[in-house]
Image (cartoon, rainbow, N blue to C red):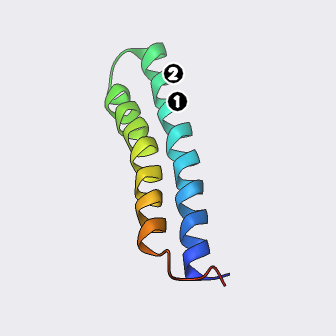
Amino acid sequence: MSLKAFHILFITVCTVFVAGFGIWAWTQHGLQAEGPHLFLALCGFGLAVALPIYGIWFLKKMKAVSFL
């Protein structure tokens, strides 16, 4: 697996994980309504949006490099 393919796979997996973390933190905030859970949920959702944007930028930058 090339470094480019691994990078795209890693960005995808990280996006799924931070979205799941954001959902978990949001539900914890709904249950407890105290602590840093709201901030953590917003950070998770922000990263879930930012990581695919970064992935698209990376693919455009590495267009000339093959996946092999």
Q: Which residue is mark 1?
A: 23
Left/right placement of residue 34 relative to residue 16 reads left
Residue in the foreground of this view, choosing between 68 and 38:
68
Residue in the foreground of this view, choosing between 42 and 29:
42
Q: Which residue is mark 2?
A: 27
Residue at the image position 52 percent from the left and 39 percent from the top: 19
Residue type pointed to by label 2:
Thr
Residue at the image position 42 percent from the left and 20 percent from the top: 29
Left/right placement of residue 56 relative to residue 68 reads left
Crowd tier of the residue under label 2, counting other residues whose Cα lies within 10 Å: few below 14, some 14–19, many 20 or above? some
Eye-nearest disc, 1 or 2: 1
Quarter residue 54 falls in: bottom left
- Residue 35 place in picture, x, y as percent: 32, 25
Above or below, comparing residue 67 to residue 48 in the picture: below
Residue in the foreground of this view, choosing between 46 and 52:
52
Q: Residue furthest front?
A: 64
Residue at the image position 42 percent from the left and 51 percent from the top: 53
Residue at the image position 33 percent from the left and 19 percent from the top: 34
Secondary structure found at label 1: helix
Quadrant including the C terminus: bottom right
Residue type pointed to by label 1:
Ile
- Residue 2 place in picture, x, y as percent: 62, 82
- Residue 66 place in picture, x, y as percent: 60, 82
Above or below, comparing residue 60 to residue 40 in the picture: below
Asked whether the residues under the numbered discs 1 and 2 touch, taking CB atoms below 8 Å apart as contact, a structural biologist would say: yes
